[in-house]
Image (spheres, rainbow, N blue to C red):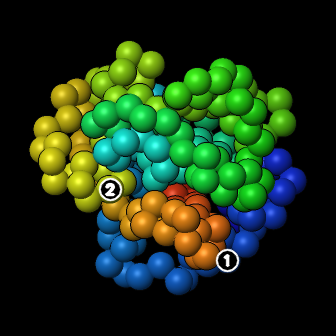
Amino acid sequence: MIRTNPLLPRLQNTTDMLVRRFESISAERKEVLNQLTGFVEKYVQARRIVHLNFICTHNSRRSHISQLWAQAAAYYYRLPDVQAYSGGTEATAFNPRAVSAMLDAGFEIVKVREGDNPVYEVSYAEEINPVTAFSKKYDNPFNHNEDFAAIMTCSHADENCPLIPGASTRITLTYDDPKEFDGTAQEMLKYKERVEEIGTEILYAFSRVIR
């Protein structure tokens, strides 16, 4: 039995549900996720800091969702030396629909600066410093820019950004964009689906790390 740390109560309930979905992940998808597991495991066993940068075009939805799940999963599975970041090929804003979907999953999110590109503080556990979330380019100085895994969460960024300077490895872990459903009757459902899909896969990858 893997020992875990407790998350915020509503997020813990969501996590418990997603962990039970591991068997729904296809064998093909698990092969990709094993690359993420392997990168984290290599650095954990070497007692080095694990730096992960989740990248999509606008750093507005999928990359933020992935970053926040990765930081929560690292804490949940007692991997304290994991630092997750996110970025885009351009900066826009953490999309409010994605923010709302993460709130529904149980993350606590507080807007600490208004503007076209608001800054949020995102909490996933008690007595742990929140994650500062805002849209930025992947090479923004706020991120760690050497010896990291570049995890490409959208096909557009993956296809149009063949070189990520400073990355030690590159993992193509793309997801469908819930933006396609903005303004439709399916909007909330599709954002929920994407948050849960990403959460399930990130949790699976971290659950397999051998210390």
3 horizontally vs 180: left or right: right
Q: Where residue 75 sits: x, y (%)?
A: 66, 42
Query: Crowding at label 1, few (<14), some or many (≥20) Cα neighbours within 10 Å?
Result: few
Q: Which residue is mark 2?
A: 154
Q: Is residue 24 above or below residue 182?
A: below
Q: Which mark is residue 123?
A: none
Residue that extends furthest to the front in the rendered view of this protein: 183
32 horizontally vs 69: left or right: left
Secondary structure at badge 2 equals: loop
Residue that extends furthest to the right in the rendered view of this protein: 9
Q: Where residue 95 sits: x, y (%)?
A: 54, 45
Q: What whole-number distance in Å separates the C-alpha atoms at marks 1 and 2?
A: 26 Å
Q: Is residue 10 above or below residue 47?
A: below
Residue that extends furthest to the top in the rendered view of this protein: 141
Residue 28 seen in render: yes
Which mark is in front, 1 or 2?
2
Q: Closest to the observer: 42 or 123?
A: 123
Residue 209 seen in render: no
Residue at the spot x=75%, y=58% of the render? 104
Query: Residue 20: which quarter of the image?
Result: bottom right
Residue at the spot x=82%, y=48% of the render? 8
At label 2, which amino acid type do we have? Answer: Cys
At label 1, which amino acid type do we have? Answer: Arg
N-terminal of the two: label 1 or label 2? Answer: 1
Q: Which residue is mark 1?
A: 20
152 horizontally vs 164: left or right: right
Q: Is residue 176 above or below residue 124?
A: below
Residue at the spot x=31%, y=45% of the render? 57
Whether pointer 1 and pointer 2 mark residues with C-beta atoms closer than 8 Å, the reply is no
Q: Where residue 22 sits: x, y (%)?
A: 56, 76
Secondary structure at badge 1 equals: loop
